[in-house]
Amino acid sequence: MDKEKKGIVIASIVGLAVGFVAGWSLKPPESGSQLALQEENPAALPSVPAATQLASPAALDLSGNLQVVAGNQRAAESVWVDRAVLEQESWLTVREYTGGKLGGILGAKRLPAGTHQAVVIELLAPTEPGKNYIIAVYLDNGDMLFDHRTDRPVQKDNQLWQASSFTAL
C-alpha cells in the first residue's frame, strides 16, 4: 500500500472512531429514559417549595400544550431531552435541584415554537452523578439571548413550571 492509501485508511478509521464516540455520548439512556410529564404524574417530579416561587409579574402562567420529556441520564457536559413541545420560541434550561431547593442554571438552549425530538442542551458545568436536576422553560424576550432576569419563566399555579426532572447517573 502506498503512503496516500495508508493515510486515507487511517483517516477513515479515526473518523469512524470519533463518530462512534460522539454517537455514544449523545445516545439517550436505554432504560427508564422517559419520565412521566408533570401533568400526568406529579409525584414523579420533586415539587418546588413555596420559598422558591417566582413572584415576578413578568412570569407567564401557561398550562397549554407545553411538554418536555427527559429521562435519567449519565452525568455529562450536556443534557438529552427526548421531546419538547413549545407554543412559543422558548429557552429550555437545566437547573440544579438540591435539598428541595432550586439551584443554578447550568445551561440553556433556545428553540422555536413547535415539536422537537432529541434536543441536546450544552452545559457550562457538567451534571454530577446522583444529583437531581429539572428542566424549566423560559420565554425569549425577543433578543435571542438567554437572561434569567429578562426572559419570562413559565409558571403553573404561581410556581415555576417543572417541565421535566432527571437524576444524573
Image (cartoon, grey):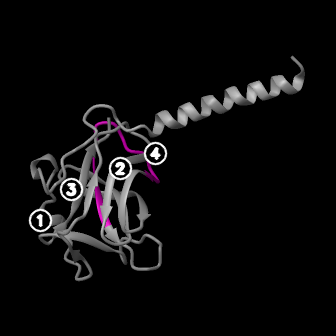
- Between disc 4 and disc 3, whose residue precedes? 4
Contact between labelled residues 2 and 3, with CB atoms less than 8 Å apart: no
Residue at the front extreme? 115
Label 1 Cα crowd, 10 Å radius (few <14 / some 14-19 / many 20+)? few
Contact between labelled residues 1 and 4, with CB atoms less than 8 Å apart: no
- Between disc 3 and disc 1, whose residue precedes? 1
Label 2 Cα crowd, 10 Å radius (few <14 / some 14-19 / many 20+)? many
- Between disc 4 and disc 1, whose residue precedes? 1
Label 4 Cα crowd, 10 Å radius (few <14 / some 14-19 / many 20+)? some
- Between disc 1 and disc 2, whose residue precedes? 1
Residue 76: percent from left, percent from top? 43, 41
Q: Which residue type does callout 4 highlight? A: Glu
Whether the magenta-drawn stretch holds residue 127 is answered as yes
Contact between labelled residues 1 and 3, with CB atoms less than 8 Å apart: no
Task: Write down the residue under mark 2.
Answer: 81
Give the alpha-carbon distance from disc 4 to disc 3, as whole Å.
22 Å
On screen, residue 83 above or below 51: above
